[in-house]
Image: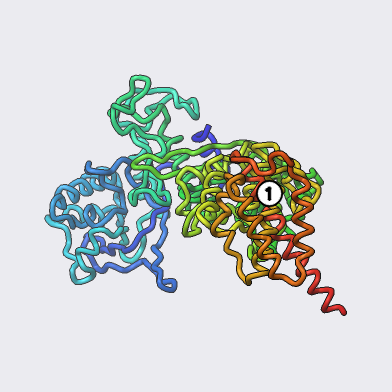
């Protein structure tokens, strides 16, 4: 399904502009030669944008796949070790491979460009370029041919015809088979092209490959083709995926994973909206986005988006030599929007005044599970698991919940993001409805929730009495997990704190109301389960934010007077 969807993307989208056997390649330098094959100059094709150098992109013959330790030359464009023999160990062999390819592929061509390139490779030794560029630099850089200042690339009709004929040749090493994607009979592609993925190998990794016999299935070995996929389908899916990964509008980094997304033909509007939902703007900028999502989720008619348009999601993760697929989704765009909207609704909670986002982005949630608050430090599997649960409407991964609890137990503050995740997990995974409200539920008699509220009251009382609150640092973790061992001590301390205040009536009254909601026989359980710990955290957060809201209201009233 993944390969079929990518092949369809190649056929529907602009990638069709890249014909089979061709590739958009980044080039650093040109070898400008005359019609006798003599090197005239080595013009640099890179441009500078700020501190970054950008290579020139040209449509050129595809780079040979599976080029690792074996020698495989590329046509018309290659690195200095092949084009100029700049390799101390195997330079001569590489140049000979490049010579053999170009002489054979251009043997039937008599154009000035083809004659010049044949003459270049027929030289006894590769030309010296030290007067133009340092050899150590040139060995790793990519070169393309120019003949009298004109590129020899896709736009050179004779060179294009020569390469298309050469690429279409069947070397006879593979037995014909039915392509699993197109259904056409032909020789399967032996090795598929490599794809560059963030966090992966510099040389790229394969999506489909057989690395060794130990990974074989259905009798396949490392000498057999990776799959019964024809040359056209193998080229099409690799080209489409590379293009999606190069376009910032079609992929997002989620922790250590990369999510690639696209809509069927003419779905640019849906793709743009989905990208905005994955990385929502700050609270003061998202009102229009939130209103649009509400409209789509309700099924209201709109001329800008098609709810039933097919949408694709492919979550990839780098690996040693082969890309791992975290998940693949194919479905209606409207269904995705509904799942995302439901996720943001579950996260909705009273703000703490410190979070700039109303719709909490994924990177912020993943960052809350780490010490340094960066999504890249999150558990390698967590990003993909969380994303899959959001987009499919499945339960949240409990590893997310455990990670949030771990950070809270480590002494971190219960901020809006942590409270929102706790609320969402309780709502979705544990079907909790009573305490998973946006703001404080003053009528709830849920014991963990009430005890969380009580802890917040005791903390506030201490801060009013002493100017600081230390029970949060010393007792919160124990109170959340084992309330029976902590709350009697905290209540005794609160009596001393209340004695220091001239007016402690408000706190004493609130303490009494909360104690009335507890069971008289066993008000403080010996231990709380993981879901009850989440309820305790929500009670604490809701009550704390209620104090802040009350203070702001009092200040506003004083200003009006």
Who's the residue at 74% across and 42% down the image? 520
Who's the residue at 35% across and 50% down the image? 159
Q: Is residue 137 left or right of residue 5?
A: left
Q: Quarter holding the C terminus?
A: bottom right
Depth check: give the residue in front, 144 or 87: 87
**In x, y percent, where is residue 181?**
49, 29
**In x, y percent, where is residue 147?**
31, 61
Task: State whether residue 221 is above or below residue 443.
Answer: above
Q: Is residue 71 left or right of residue 443?
A: left
**In x, y percent, where is residue 207?**
41, 38
Q: Which residue is mark 1?
A: 451
**In x, y percent, where is residue 509?**
79, 58
Please indicate, yes or no, whether residue 16 appears anywhere in the rendered image. Answer: no
Secondary structure beneath dot 1 equals helix
Please indicate, yes or no, whether residue 439 appears anywhere in the rendered image. Answer: yes
Depth check: give the residue in front, 149 or 342: 342
Q: Is residue 53 left or right of residue 448?
A: left
Quadrant of residue 393 within the rendered picture: top right
Task: State whether residue 371 is above or below residue 318.
Answer: below
Depth check: give the residue in front, 6 or 235: 6
Depth check: give the residue in front, 31 or 404: 404
Who's the residue at 40% across and 22% down the image? 177
Q: How is the image coloured?
A: rainbow
Quadrant of residue 361 within the rendered picture: bottom right
Q: Residue furthest right?
A: 561
Who's the residue at 30% across and 57% down the image? 112
């Amino acid at each position: 399904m993944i390969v079929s969807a990518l092949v369809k993307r190649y056929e529907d989208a602009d990638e069709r502009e890249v014909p089979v056997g061709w590739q958009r390649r980044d080039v650093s330098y040109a070898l400008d030669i005359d019609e006798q094959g003599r090197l005239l100059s080595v013009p640099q094709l890179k441009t500078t944008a700020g501190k970054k150098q950008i290579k020139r992109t040209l449509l050129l013959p595809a780079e040979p796949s599976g080029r690792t330790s074996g020698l495989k030359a590329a046509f018309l464009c290659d690195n200095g070790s092949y084009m100029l023999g700049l390799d101390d160990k195997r330079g001569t062999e590489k140049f000979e491979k490049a010579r053999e390819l170009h002489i054979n592929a251009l043997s039937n061509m008599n154009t000035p460009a083809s004659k010049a390139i044949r003459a270049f490779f027929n030289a006894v030794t590769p030309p010296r370029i030290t007067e133009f560029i340092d050899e150590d630099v040139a060995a790793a850089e990519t070169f393309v041919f120019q003949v009298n200042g004109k590129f020899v690339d896709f736009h050179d009709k004779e060179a294009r015809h020569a390469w298309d004929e050469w690429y279409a040749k069947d070397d006879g090493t593979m037995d014909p088979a039915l392509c699993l994607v197109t259904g056409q009979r032909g020789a399967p592609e032996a090795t598929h092209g490599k794809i560059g993925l963030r966090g992966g190998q510099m040389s790229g990794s394969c999506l489909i490959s057989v690395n060794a016999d130990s990974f074989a299935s259905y009798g396949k070995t490392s000498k057999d083709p990776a799959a019964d996929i024809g040359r056209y389908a193998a080229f099409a899916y690799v080209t489409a995926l590379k293009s999606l990964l190069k376009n910032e509008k079609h992929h997002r980094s989620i922790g250590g994973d990369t999510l690639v997304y696209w809509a069927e033909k003419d779905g640019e509007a849906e793709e743009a909206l989905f990208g905005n939902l994955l990385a929502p703007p700050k609270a003061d900028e998202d009102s229009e986005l939130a209103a649009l999502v509400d409209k789509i989720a309700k099924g209201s008619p709109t001329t800008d988006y098609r709810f039933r348009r097919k949408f694709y999601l492919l979550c990839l993760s780098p690996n040693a030599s082969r890309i791992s697929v975290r998940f693949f989704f194919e479905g209606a765009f409207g269904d995705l929007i509904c799942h995302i909207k439901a996720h943001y609704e579950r996260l909705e909670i009273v703000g703490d005044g410190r979070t700039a986002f109303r719709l909490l982005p994924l990177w912020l949630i993943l960052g809350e599970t780490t010490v340094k608050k960066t999504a890249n430090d999150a558990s390698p599997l967590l990003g993909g698991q969380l994303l899959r649960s959001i987009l499919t409407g499945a339960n949240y991964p409990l590893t997310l919940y455990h990670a949030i609890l771990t950070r809270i137990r480590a002494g971190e503050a219960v901020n809006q993001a942590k409270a929102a995740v706790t609320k969402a997990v309780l709502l979705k995974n544990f079907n909790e409805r009573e305490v998973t409200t946006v703001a404080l539920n003053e009528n709830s008699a849920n014991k963990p929730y009430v005890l969380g509220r009580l802890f917040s009251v005791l903390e506030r009382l201490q801060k009013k009495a002493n100017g600081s609150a230390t029970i949060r640092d010393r007792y919160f973790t124990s109170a959340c997990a084992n309330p029976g061992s902590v709350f009697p001590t905290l209540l005794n301390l609160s009596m001393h704190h209340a004695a220091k205040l001239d007016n402690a009536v408000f706190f004493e009254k609130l303490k009494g109301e909360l104690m009335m909601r507890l069971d008289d026989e066993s008000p403080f359980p010996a231990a709380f389960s993981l879901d009850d710990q989440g309820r305790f955290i929500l009670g604490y957060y809701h009550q704390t934010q209620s104090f802040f809201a009350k203070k702001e209201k009092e200040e506003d009233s004083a200003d009006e007077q």
